[in-house]
């Protein structure tokens, strides 16, 4: 009987050691957010049209900022990669607020460009040449304060004007 008890005791120790000595396992980490950004650029009747949409393709909500000059950034870049000012605005602007984007949901932005840009407060025609439309979507995987850095997804498409 002693030998049988010893075998049971040894088997018990082996089973505990194979379970990590009784330690509690860590929960599986949250899956990394997955954001898809699509950018469509085309010319129609002398106008350049750009449309972008960001989709939360992950399993958890993400958080982005929406408002005037917030959300999906759509810009025209010159040959040096510098953004052109498309409008001579002075405001007022809608304040930017953080919004939850649930899994499977999308947010979009678009513009129609007729050929004029703003230079030193004056509207002037864009010179013929090669340019790029830039789309950028800035988001955070968690809305807790101080959760680390935001992440950005970007896309670019080239075009020739006019």
Image: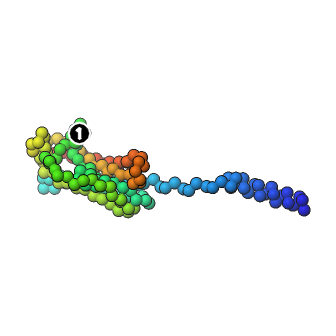
Viewer-closest of 77 and 41: 77
Q: Label 1: which residue?
A: 82
Give how far across and how far down residue 148 sits, in percent: 42, 46
Q: Is residue 47 left or right of residue 72?
A: left
Give how far across and how far down residue 75 sits, in percent: 23, 47
**Residue at the image position 41 percent from the left and 48 percent from the top:** 146
Q: Is residue 55 left or right of residue 91?
A: right
Viewer-closest of 160 and 57: 57
Q: Residue furthest right?
A: 1
Q: Residue furthest front?
A: 145
Image quadrant holding the N terminus, namely bottom right
Is the residue 83 above or below the residue 72 in the image? above
Helix, strand or loop at mark 1: loop
Is the residue 19 above or below the residue 117 in the image? below
Model colouring: rainbow
Give how far across and how far down residue 97 sits, in percent: 29, 55
Give how far across and how far down residue 104 sits, in percent: 38, 63
**Residue at the image position 23 percent from the left and 45 percent from the top:** 132
Q: Residue furthest top?
A: 80
Viewer-closest of 128 and 101: 101
Q: Is residue 38 visible?
A: no
Number of marks in the rendered image: 1
**Residue at the image position 27 percent from the left and 58 percent from the top:** 108
Viewer-closest of 55 and 42: 55
Q: Is residue 109 visible?
A: yes
**Residue at the image position 13 percent from the left and 51 percent from the top:** 114
Q: How would you rate the neighbour count of disc 1 (Cα within 10 Å): few for under 14, some for 14-19, many for 20 or more? A: few
Q: Is residue 123 left or right of residue 131?
A: left
């Amino acid at each position: 009987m002693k030998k049988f008890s010893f075998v049971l005791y040894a088997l018990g120790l082996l089973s505990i050691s194979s379970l990590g000595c009784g330690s509690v396992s860590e929960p599986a980490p949250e899956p990394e957010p997955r954001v898809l950004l699509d950018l469509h650029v085309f010319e129609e009747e002398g106008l350049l049209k750009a449309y972008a949409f960001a989709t939360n393709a992950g399993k958890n909500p993400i958080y982005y900022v929406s408002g005037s000059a917030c959300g999906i950034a759509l810009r025209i870049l010159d040959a040096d990669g510098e953004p052109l000012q498309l409008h001579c605005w002075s405001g007022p602007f809608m304040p930017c607020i953080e919004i939850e984007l649930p899994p499977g949901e999308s947010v979009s932005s678009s513009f129609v460009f007729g050929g004029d840009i703003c230079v030193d407060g004056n509207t002037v025609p864009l010179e013929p040449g090669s340019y790029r439309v830039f789309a950028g979507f800035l988001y955070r995987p968690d809305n807790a304060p101080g959760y680390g850095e935001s992440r950005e997804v970007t896309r670019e498409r080239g075009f020739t004007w006019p």
